[in-house]
Image (tube, rainbow, N blue to C red):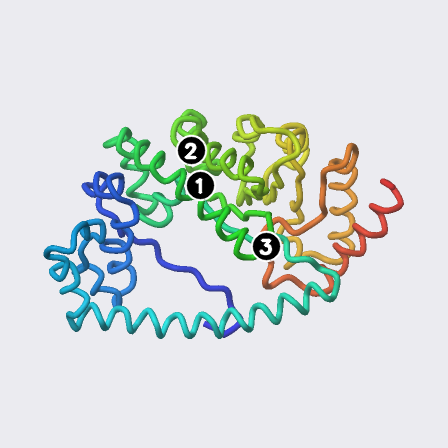
């Protein structure tokens, strides 16, 4: 794989089907003592750690600290310290690059990150196969676990926004897309806790920015049940005209210039498409011309054509 190529990860079943109760009982302890050692081999020492809420009295407190003296635990912390040092180098390089981009007149679009609870379970913990089976085999446990994750996802979004000083929260949406779930399953398993996260973020004064990756045409009406003027939606392959008539009534839309067009199309094809979506979405405001997904391999001339068409046609037609 080339150094500049985008990476992906093979999905795994890192949480077992019989571990829902452990996740629900103490999510933080489950992640630190069970999930992380399974994902990162060098963090295996965390499996030996006690629950720190057991430190209640001076009498016998030494027993709680014994695991921290064990070589596997100390090796785990050493691995974390080394990873932290590398992360600081990475952050420095990214920070310098972001400063250069901002100075050139392109503000960073998001400062925070969180996820829909269904995607936490389906992407991160159980995997696609696992969460699909769980909807039939243990639906109540799945629903309970997602409810337990709601406040954690809200705090994650708010916390990252406070850390960066940027109020827009990026929320990549995955397994709620058309083709993953039926409409009934979406409305039972995906939307309720996702909406709770969105409302929690809004109440905390930040701006949710869901990225509707793929097609969400059968979800748009349901997802328009939100306060007006509080959200920013990235549209990938969904019908942009339908999106404008649904979630576009309550939030700002951006995107829909698709990656295949930017990679394989011509500058004129890009300009023609940009004009089309401007005519569809610009009336009434609340639309930003943009790529609809990551476009690492887009032709530079096509990206320039997208920006030029938005500036030239948009400014003339919709002042």
**Rendering coords of residue 89 (x, y %):** 49, 75
Q: Is residue 55 left or right of residue 135?
A: left
In the image, residue 306 above or below residue 129:
below
Question: Hey, which quadrant is residue 132 in on the image?
Answer: top left
Q: Quadrant of the C terminus?
A: top right
Q: Secondary structure at mark 1?
A: loop
In the image, residue 132 above or below residue 11:
above
Residues under numbered marks 1 and 2 in contact, where contact means CB atoms less than 8 Å apart: yes
Q: Quadrant of the N terminus?
A: bottom left
Residue at the image point whose x is 54% and y is 72% from the top: 92
Residue at the image point whose x is 20% and y is 65% from the top: 45
Q: Is residue 92 left or right of residue 138?
A: right
Mark 2 Cα shell of 10 Å, populated few (<14), some (14-19), many (≥20): many
Residue at the image point whose x is 63% and y is 53% from the top: 109
Mark 1 Cα shell of 10 Å, populated few (<14), some (14-19), many (≥20): many
Q: Nearer the viewer, mark 2 or mark 3?
A: 3
Frontmost residue, 103 versus 317? 103
**Which is nearer the N-term, disc 1 or disc 3?**
1
Q: Nearer the viewer, mark 1 or mark 3?
A: 3
**Which is nearer the N-term, disc 2 or disc 3?**
3
Residue holding disc 3 = 165
Q: Is residue 36 left or right of residue 246?
A: left
Q: Which disc, if any, is residue 19?
A: none
Residues under numbered marks 2 and 3 in contact, where contact means CB atoms less than 8 Å apart: no
Residue holding disc 1 = 116
Question: Hey, which quadrant is residue 72 in on the image?
Answer: bottom left
Whole-Å distance between the Cαs marked 1 and 3? 22 Å
**Rendering coords of residue 49 (x, y %):** 19, 59
Whole-Å distance between the Cαs marked 1 and 2? 7 Å
Residue holding disc 2 = 193
**Which is nearer the N-term, disc 1 or disc 2?**
1
């Amino acid at each position: 794989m080339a150094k500049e190529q985008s990476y992906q990860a093979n999905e795994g079943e890192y949480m077992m089907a019989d571990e829902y109760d452990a996740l629900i009982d103490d999510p933080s302890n489950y992640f630190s003592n069970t999930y992380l050692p399974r994902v990162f081999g060098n963090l295996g020492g965390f499996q030996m750690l006690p629950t720190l809420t057991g430190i209640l009295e001076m009498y016998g407190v030494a027993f709680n600290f014994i695991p921290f003296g064990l070589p596997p635990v100390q090796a785990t912390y050493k691995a974390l310290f080394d990873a932290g040092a590398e992360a600081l180098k990475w952050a420095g390089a990214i920070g310098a690059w972001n400063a250069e981009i901002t100075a050139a007149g392109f503000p960073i679009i998001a400062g925070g990150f969180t996820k829909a609870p269904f995607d936490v379970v389906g992407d991160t913990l159980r995997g696609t196969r696992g969460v699909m089976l769980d909807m039939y085999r243990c639906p109540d446990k799945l629903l309970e676990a997602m409810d337990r994750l709601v406040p954690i996802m809200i705090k994650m979004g708010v916390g990252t926004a406070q850390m960066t000083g940027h109020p827009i929260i990026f929320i990549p949406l995955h397994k709620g897309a058309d083709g993953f779930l039926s409409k009934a399953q979406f409305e039972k398993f995906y939307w309720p806790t996702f909406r709770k996260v969105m409302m929690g973020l809004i109440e905390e004064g930040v701006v949710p920015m869901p990225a509707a990756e793929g097609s969400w045409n059968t979800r748009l009406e349901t997802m328009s049940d939100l306060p007006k003027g509080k959200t920013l939606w990235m549209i990938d392959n969904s019908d942009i005209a339908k999106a404008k008539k649904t979630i576009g009534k309550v939030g700002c839309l951006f995107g829909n210039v698709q990656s295949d067009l930017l990679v394989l199309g011509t500058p004129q094809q890009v300009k023609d498409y940009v004009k089309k979506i401007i005519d569809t979405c610009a009336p009434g405001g609340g639309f930003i011309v943009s790529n609809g997904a990551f476009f690492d391999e887009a032709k530079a001339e096509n990206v320039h054509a997208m920006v030029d068409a938005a500036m030239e046609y948009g400014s003339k037609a919709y002042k």
